[in-house]
Amino acid sequence: MRRYEATFEIDSKADAYAIHRILERVYDTVREESQNDRVGSDDASTLLDEFRTLRDAAARPASGSLTITYERDDESAR
């Protein structure tokens, strides 16, 4: 399994705004994909709820950090 990680430090209102925009975009993408792939499933609802929570938390400017981790199962890529 390969693991990729990126950490964004939030030190200003501009940083917070950029993170909020990233999370809005991710939320919209996940929502659209889950509508196509897993309509009405509990997995899709849970995933959307988690991303909604992240997006909403980022709407209030504050300092901190955001770490995004992407893990890829090399076996499934074949």
Image: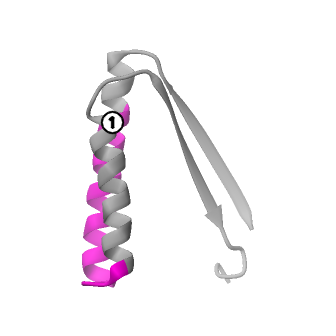
State the residue at coordinates (65%, 67%). 72
Q: Quadrant of residue 45?
A: bottom left
Residue 27 position within the rendered picture, expressed as x and y whole percent measured from the top left: 31, 55
The scheme the figure's colours follow is one colour
Vertical arrangement, residue 43 with respect to residue 16, above or below: below
State the residue at coordinates (27%, 66%). 31
Quadrant of the drawing holding the C terminus: bottom right
Q: Quadrant of residue 41?
A: bottom left
Q: Main secondary structure of the magenta part?
A: helix
Q: Quadrant of residue 18?
A: top left
Indicate whether residue 32 is drawn in magenta. Answer: yes
Would you name the residue on which mark 1 appears? 58
Region rendered in magenta: 19-42
Residue 15 position within the rendered picture, expressed as x and y whole percent measured from the top left: 39, 23
Tell which of 4 and 62 is nearer to you.
62
State the residue at coordinates (32%, 39%). 57
Residue 66 position within the rendered picture, expressed as x and y whole percent measured from the top left: 50, 37
Residue 22 position within the rendered picture, expressed as x and y whole percent measured from the top left: 35, 42
Quadrant of the drawing holding the N terminus: bottom right
Mark 1 belongs to which amino acid?
Ala
Q: Is residue 27 left or right of residue 43?
A: left
Q: Is residue 43 left or right of residue 35?
A: right
